[in-house]
Image: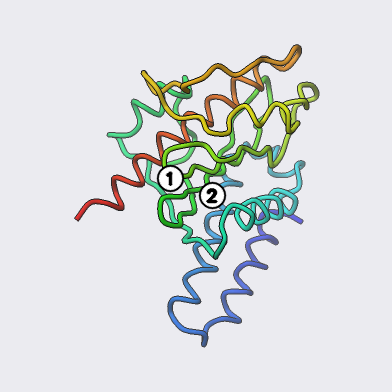
């Protein structure tokens, strides 16, 4: 299934809910648009070969498991004010102008693509009240370093917070042969924690 087909299916679901009320209709629109933004973070050749349907399904499952009830889907614009810190955390600029996220109270979920050695890794991060609750690999495209998907590696992130200079308050053990993928996972975890803070500030603003 291509990107256009995935969007068409999501749009069809929106049309079927047209008489269900404004609130019900906006929910699938935002959800579909969020998945589209995640896919657009990927380079064109990856969109064509990875299988957008798989990424969409993994993202939907990740979000369902992250919340006890349907969460609000939204997008955070990466403004000029945010870009310097994003660049500091990732060591490069983001390819997109906004990032999709889901929120329920003080709990947020993020799905972000970050290149390991050569290919982007689609990473999901759940943040609860300023701490990482879980990290998952939703799509791994590198030829080596698949160990970053293992539960033993991922549980290192659970409970982590941001410390000085937007770094994690703990060290993450590396994996032989997967150094760049481990760094990508760590950068995205740091970014999700910082973005969570920004979303909470926005939510608390009068």
Q: Are marks 1 and 2 in contact (CB under 8 Å)?
A: yes
Structural distance between the alpha carbons of marks 1 and 2 = 8 Å
Extreme-top residue of the structure: 176
- Tell me: residue 128, above or below residue 19: above
> Quick one: label 1 or label 2, which is nearer the N terminus?
2
Q: Residues within 10 Å of mark 1 (few under 14, many from 20)?
A: some
Number of numbered discs visible in the structure rendering:
2
Q: Position of residue 96 (x, y in %)?
A: 47, 40
Q: Please provide percent x and percent y for residue 145.
A: 76, 22
The residue positioned farthest toward the front in the image shown? 159
x and y percentages locating residue 93 in the rendered image? 44, 27
Q: Helix, strand, or loop for circle 1?
A: strand
Q: Residue at x 49, y 54 (%)?
A: 102
Q: How is the image coloured?
A: rainbow
Question: Eyeballing the image, is 54 above or below 115?
Answer: below
- Give neighbour class at mark 2: few <14, some 14-19, many 20+ (Cα, 10 Å): some
Q: Position of residue 81 (x, y in %)?
A: 27, 34
Identify which residue is drawn at 62% across, 26% down: 156
The front one of 159 and 66 is: 159
Q: Residue furthest right?
A: 143
Q: Which residue is mark 2?
A: 37
Please indicate whether residue 62 sits to the left or right of residue 150 in the image. Answer: left
Relative side of 184 to 81, left or right:
right
Q: Which mark is residue 60?
A: none
Instruction: Left or right? Give the position of 169 relative to 77.
Output: right
- Which residue was labeled with disc 1? 98
């Amino acid at each position: 299934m291509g990107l256009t087909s995935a969007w068409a299916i999501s749009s069809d679901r929106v049309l079927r809910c047209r008489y269900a009320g404004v609130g019900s209709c906006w929910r699938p629109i935002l959800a579909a648009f969020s998945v589209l933004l995640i896919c657009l973070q990927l380079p064109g050749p990856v969109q064509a070969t990875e299988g957008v349907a798989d990424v969409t399904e993994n993202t939907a499952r990740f979000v369902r498991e992250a919340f006890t009830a349907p969460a609000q889907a939204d997008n955070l614009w990466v403004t000029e004010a945010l870009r310097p810190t994003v660049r500091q955390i990732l060591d490069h600029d983001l390819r997109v102008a906004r990032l999709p996220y889901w929120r329920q109270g003080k709990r947020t979920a993020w799905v972000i693509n970050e290149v390991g050695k050569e290919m982007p890794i689609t990473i999901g991060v759940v943040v609860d009240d300023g701490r990482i609750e879980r990290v998952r690999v939703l799509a791994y495209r590198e030829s080596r370093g698949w160990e970053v998907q293992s539960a033993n590696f991922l549980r290192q992130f659970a409970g982590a917070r941001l410390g000085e200079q937007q770094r994690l308050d703990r060290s993450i053990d590396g994996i032989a042969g997967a150094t760049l993928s481990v760094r990508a996972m760590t950068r995205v975890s740091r970014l999700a924690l910082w973005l969570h803070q920004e979303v909470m500030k926005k939510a608390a603003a009068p």
